[in-house]
Image (spheres, rainbow, N blue to C red):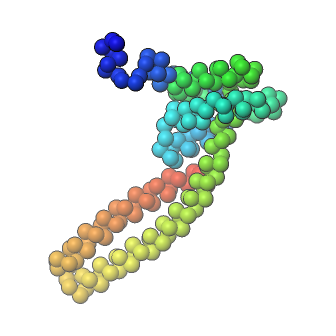
Amino acid sequence: MSKIEDQFPGSSLFDLRGKQSVRATFKLSQKAIDAIGLVAIHMGIKQKSLFDHIIEDLDALNTLAKNIQVRQFKKIPRIQKTFVISRRTIDALEASSQAHGKPRDALVEYSIQKLESLIDAEKIRHEERKKLQRYLNSHFDQGILFLTKARNILGENDPFCRRLEKAVFACEKSRAEIDDYIEKSRVIEDF
């Protein structure tokens, strides 16, 4: 066994090459481009990882390739977009494309459509988050009123009031982070 293999147990050069990043350009619909961007940004997943996830299941990719109707695909207005993906993902796309005689772009386009159910589920969760945000804001406002009441009774410099003020400040910071997250997530509403 070589010294290099000892340093990376369980890895082979083939495995490492498969994780190598490459640039690939596809012609996709604006909806597919928006979907991949939305899921990546909204869920904090790198686009490369997202591509790996939706394309790495070779059985699903081959099943998809068998069902693609190229005439339908050609009717979709598409634009060129370059993505960074893993070598393993691009190899899987190439192999499936060649095996079934289907355009690589079509495989990517229809693979991305798998994300629509995820986006639909996320839209529902977003609406629930907005309801909870309103509930949280109501409770926060009650906390402000309680702090004001405590200051009126005990005085602003009372140790209880100072500790309560710290708690309210921490809640305000968390509320601002939640508000920011909800605001950034609004892009999902129009998808």
Choose between 57 and 179: the one closer to the eye.
57
Name which residue lies at 51% across and 35% down.
49
Say how many tags the image has. Answer: 0
Left or right of 177 in this view: 112: right
Q: Is residue 75 among what the camera can see?
A: no
Pick the quarter of the image with the N terminus. top left
Question: Residue most toward the right?
Answer: 71
Vertical side of 145 occupied by 5: above or below: above
Vertical side of 186 occupied by 84: above or below: above
Name which residue lies at 34% across and 76% down.
144
Name which residue lies at 20% across and 78% down.
160
Choose between 80 and 46: the one closer to the eye.
46
Left or right of 22 in this view: 69: right
Name which residue lies at 35% across and 76% down.
143
Question: Residue most toward the front?
Answer: 1
Q: Quadrant of residue 169?
A: bottom left
Q: Quadrant of residue 137?
A: bottom left
Question: Residue most toward the top?
Answer: 2
Give coordinates of residue 161: x percent, y percent.
Answer: 22, 77
Q: Is residue 115 among what the camera can see?
A: yes
Give coordinates of residue 66: x percent, y percent.
Answer: 76, 29
Left or right of 98 in this view: 171: left
Give coordinates of residue 79: x percent, y percent.
Answer: 67, 30
Give coordinates of residue 11: x percent, y percent.
Answer: 41, 22
Left or right of 49 in this view: 64: right
